[in-house]
């Protein structure tokens, strides 16, 4: 019997720096940014509130036009998987780094300081990247009323 495993990450946090997009020699876009996620709890010993922030490095492939949208302080939803890589540093020591490889990134609007996009913004909660399974050809343009000689009006449409 084959065993199953799951490698899935979901983050909702704020960008710690502006996203940077670079291109591989083959022309594929690689966008990298960091996301801060925080948790808050009440210390049982002292009774005071404490907060801890974790930083995650995120890599998003084949999304060229993100630098204008993924800027420091913006809140984002990131869905993807963990990937650990290793390399040798300048002293020859092996270093391991774990990143989130994103499949989907959605701008949630707002900035950490209260500014930024609100819910009425055209781009709020719009996916910046779409999972490959959700990408489809654009829908055909809606027909005008003159194309329906049967006398159908807007009042006949149930939605």
Image (spheres, rainbow, N blue to C red):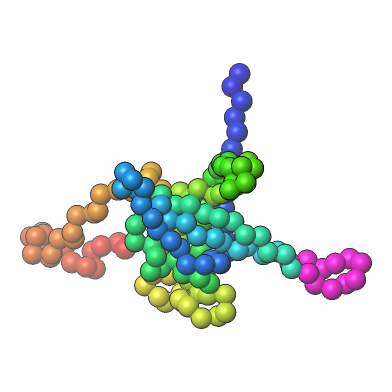
Q: Quadrant of residue 5?
A: top right
Quick one: quadrant of the C terminus?
A: bottom left
Residue drawn at (52%, 54%) of the image: 58
Quick one: quadrant of the N terminus?
A: top right
**Is 112 a magenta residue?**
no
Q: Residue 99: percent from the left, percent from the top? A: 56, 49
Is 121 located above or below residue 143 in the figure? Answer: below
Q: Nearer the viewer, residue 55 or 140?
A: 55
Q: Seen in the image, is 111 located left or right of residue 123?
A: right
Residue drawn at (50%, 60%) of the image: 33
Q: Seen in the image, is 120 located left or right of residue 42?
A: left
Is 25 located above or below residue 158 in the figure? Answer: above
Q: Is residue 143 visible?
A: yes
Residue drawn at (43%, 61%) of the image: 20
Q: Residue 94: percent from the left, percent from the top? A: 63, 41
Q: Residue 93: percent from the left, percent from the top? A: 64, 42
Segment tinted magenta in the rendering: 40-50
Q: Residue 61: percent from the left, percent from the top? A: 41, 49
């Amino acid at each position: 019997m084959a065993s199953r495993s799951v490698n899935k990450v979901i983050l909702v946090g704020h960008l710690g720096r502006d996203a940077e997009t670079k291109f591989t020699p083959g022309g594929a876009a690689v966008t990298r940014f960091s996301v801060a996620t925080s948790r808050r709890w009440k210390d049982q010993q002292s009774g005071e509130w404490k907060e801890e922030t974790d930083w995650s490095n995120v890599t998003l492939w084949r999304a060229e036009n993100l630098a204008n949208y993924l800027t420091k302080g913006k809140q984002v939803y990131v869905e993807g998987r963990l990937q650990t890589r290793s390399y040798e540093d300048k002293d020859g020591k092996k270093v391991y780094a774990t990143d989130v490889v994103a499949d989907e990134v959605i701008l949630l609007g707002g900035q950490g300081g209260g500014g930024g996009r609100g819910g009425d913004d055209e781009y709020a909660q719009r996916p910046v990247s779409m999972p490959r399974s959700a990408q489809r050809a654009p829908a055909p343009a809606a027909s005008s009323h003159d194309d329906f000689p049967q006398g159908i009006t807007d009042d006949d449409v149930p939605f």
